Amino acid sequence: MKTIRIFFIALCGLVLLSGLTPVRAMEVIATLDPTEVHISAFYNGTTVAVSGVIPADTEAVIRIIGQRENVHAKEKGKVGGVLWMNIKDITFENVPGTFILLTSEKLKDMVDSPDSTIGFAAVKNEVTILPESEDKDFLYGEFVKLKKKQNLFLEDTSGITYGTDPEGNRTISANLPIPPMMKPGSYDIEIMAVRDGKVVGQENLKLKVREIGLPKKLSELAFQHSLLYGIMAVVIAVLAGLLMGVIFKGKGGGAH
């Protein structure tokens, strides 16, 4: 009798639990258009459209992270207090070639925090600067400034437009900039929903950037036939110099 009673209680518990709505992870749904960018002879950068839905009461973060690479640079300084010259080699290891971040003013303090796992501080924590004796904060700051001038590092707090769908979720749309100097390759596009400083949902998309036409032919020539490419580059440089000389001579230029 006691066994039957325990079984009955357990069965009732299962029935009650089956009627409850299961707890689901917060969903982020996003699409990318186009999913592939072509670099042609007259390519000067473009944009791709990101659209999607995030949970209500969240803010969106859209991020492009390029392939990791090692960057070698020269640190300049005054020699003898007079001449500016290259004085040492600096290597930045494990840096993304591109880092573009779209967010909102509400998230700016969180994203810019030194403890951020989303913004430039997150990249800095993953970068190694050699030699290790160098001032990492200063050199990384200068590196970011250079990347920003090339439009390869970017933070925009006004690039996302919000709306509401019939179910009360937030819709998002943005034109994600693809700068001219962005290298061919495969890029991760991350769309995150943030609430109370925490990422509560995320969608990952892929963007391919590839060369077509003349840029593709030149790239293949440079990598597959480097000697011929070098000879052609020298010949073109010489011909360009001769042409400029003829043009200026025809205009009456020259030393007097």
Image (spheres, rainbow, N blue to C red):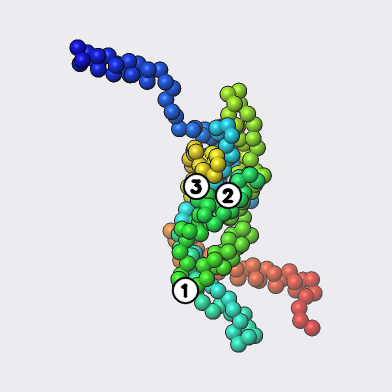
Real-space Cα distance between discs 3 and 2? 24 Å
> Is 82 above or below relative to 198?
below
Residue at the image point whose x is 55% and y is 52% from the top: 119
Real-space Cα distance between discs 1 and 3? 32 Å
Residue on which disc 1 sits: 133
Residue at the image point whose x is 63% and y is 29% from the top: 164
Q: Secondary structure at mark 3?
A: strand
The total number of labels drawn is 3
Q: Nearer the viewer, mark 1 or mark 3?
A: 1
Q: Nearer the viewer, residue 118 or 17?
A: 17
Residue on which disc 2 sits: 110
Residue on which disc 3 sits: 187
Q: In terms of sequence position, does the residue under pointer 2 or pointer 1 come before the other?
A: 2
Number of residues whose C-alpha sits closer than 10 Å to that of mark 2, classed few (under 14), some (14–19) or many (20 or more): some
Which kind of residue does numbered mark 3 sit on? Answer: Tyr
Q: In terms of sequence position, does the residue under pointer 3 or pointer 2 come before the other?
A: 2
Which kind of residue does numbered mark 2 sit on? Answer: Met
- Does the image show residue 58? yes
Q: In terms of sequence position, does the residue under pointer 1 or pointer 3 come before the other?
A: 1
Quarter-of-image position of residue 24: top left
Q: Nearer the viewer, residue 185 or 193?
A: 193
> Is 161 above or below relative to 65?
above
